Amino acid sequence: MPAQSLLQFTGKSIYCAVANAHIDPWIPVDRAIITHAHSDHARWGSKHYLAHKDSEPILRLRLGQDISLQTVEYYEKFVINGVTFSLHPAGHIVGSAQVRVEYKGEVWVASGDYKLENDNFATPYEPVKCNVFITESTFGLPIYKWQPQHEVMSEIDNWWRQNKSEDKASVLMGYSLGKMQRILKNIELQDKVIYAHGAIYTLNERLRQAGFDLPELTLVTKETDRKLFRGSLVLAPPSVDSSTWIKKFAPYSLGYCSGWMALRGAKNRRAVDQGFVLSDHVDWPDLNTAVKESGAEKVYVTHGYTSIYARYLNENGIEAGEVHTMYGNEDENEEEEVVQDISAGTEAYEKHKESLDDEVIIDTKPSPKQSQKEKSPSGDLGANTHTA
Ligand SMILES: [Zn+2]
Ligand SMILES: [Zn+2]
């Protein structure tokens, strides 16, 4: 009988049979290890949960106050039936973790969702050496290359300032968990009062109660005097753009923070005035950096441009496989974002393929020359270091 893999893709989770533990299961199980509190990874109904301690306030808010939840610190080892587990910072959102699984000298890492840039709120990502690396590829195409965070934050500052000068409200949409905390920690807070939709207000309050350093927000209610919105910043989840809720802010400018804003036409499809390209997932260069730094000889790609990215890795000397999971719809309750247009992705991949083949050779030391790095946006593996 062939030895079974340490982690398996069973159609309901990433499963460790020896420990009988499931990572991010999408159906109820006995023992669930949760990478982070986004609803596509942390689902309702399991008997016992285990997660990083910073995930606790949001997990309890979303899955129920009385769930059976054990929390651990990063790097803290826990052993289940001889399998050693530990959680390592993933830098995606508060409490997000990569799950390291070790058994009989073999190491697998299930990275959940992650980003390499330090967002000044989530504990920054750290590479974890492993034999097998399980990765997302939400933005796994060369067309996705993020600007440094401080540049996007200045764009938001300037947009707000401009709207203020025109006496308009600045309604800024983004994921309530992750994106909004990141924005609040990195923009210039031009007013004492920042307004928020209930979804964002509740999360922010929960995190503040748990001791996180976040500014206090003011909940928008039916009673709030509409005149107060003039010139103000209003934070909202992405579902509000087609709702009547938003009408009370008129005159307003509507902004949207998302990695998808990098796609041509995305801004118009969402009918927003201003798109800010800001994602809590890795872009193409950082995805390849992460894969390289893991040192893995085998990679599984769980969500996003899975087939394209798996093919890319295989063509570049890293054995890779695509797996089908239920991850990728960040927050079902508030995101109706149609995840990537696959046809657009395939086209973009084909277009870049030639330059990729020329420029990217895994296991070859990339040129350290800065000028060259800038000239090859299509992914010079390993040349992109973590931005702090
Ligand atoms: Zn996520
Ligand atoms: Zn995800």
Image (tube, rainbow, N blue to C red):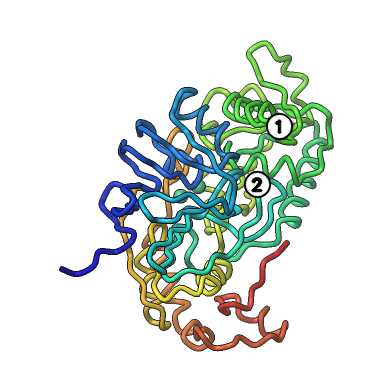
Please give the count of numbered marks on the rendered protein: 2
Please tell me whether mark 1 sits on a helix, a strand or a loop.
loop
Whole-Å distance between the Cαs marked 2 and 1?
33 Å
Q: Is the residue 119 above or below the residue 102 in the image?
A: above
Disc 1 crowd rating (10 Å Cα; few below 14, some 14-19, many 20+) is few
Q: Which mark is residue 179?
A: none
**N-terminal-most mark, 2 or 1:** 1
Tag 1 residue: 211
Image point (47%, 44%), residue name: 330
Residue 374 location (% of width, % of height): 68, 78
Q: Would you identify the image quadrant in which residue 297 lies? A: bottom left
Q: Is residue 199 visible?
A: yes
Residue 279 visible in the picture? no
Q: Residues within 10 Å of mark 2 (few under 14, many from 20)?
A: some
- Looking at the image, is mark 2 or mark 1 nearer the viewer? 1
Looking at the image, residue 226 sits to the left or right of residue 47; the answer is right
* Quadrant occupied by the N terminus: bottom left
Q: Position of residue 259 (x, y in %)?
A: 56, 54
Residue at 31% x, 60% y: name it. 323
Is mark 2 in CB contact (under 8 Å) with mark 1? no
Q: Quadrant of residue 104?
A: bottom left
Three-letter amino acid code of the residue under disc 2? Gln
For label 2, the residue is 274
Locate residue 177 relative to residue 385 in the image: left or right: left
What is the three-letter code of the residue carrying label 1? Answer: Gly
Between 17 and 242, the residue placed more toward the observer is: 17
Q: Residue at 71% of width from left, 86% of height from top?
A: 369
Q: Quadrant of the C terminus?
A: bottom right
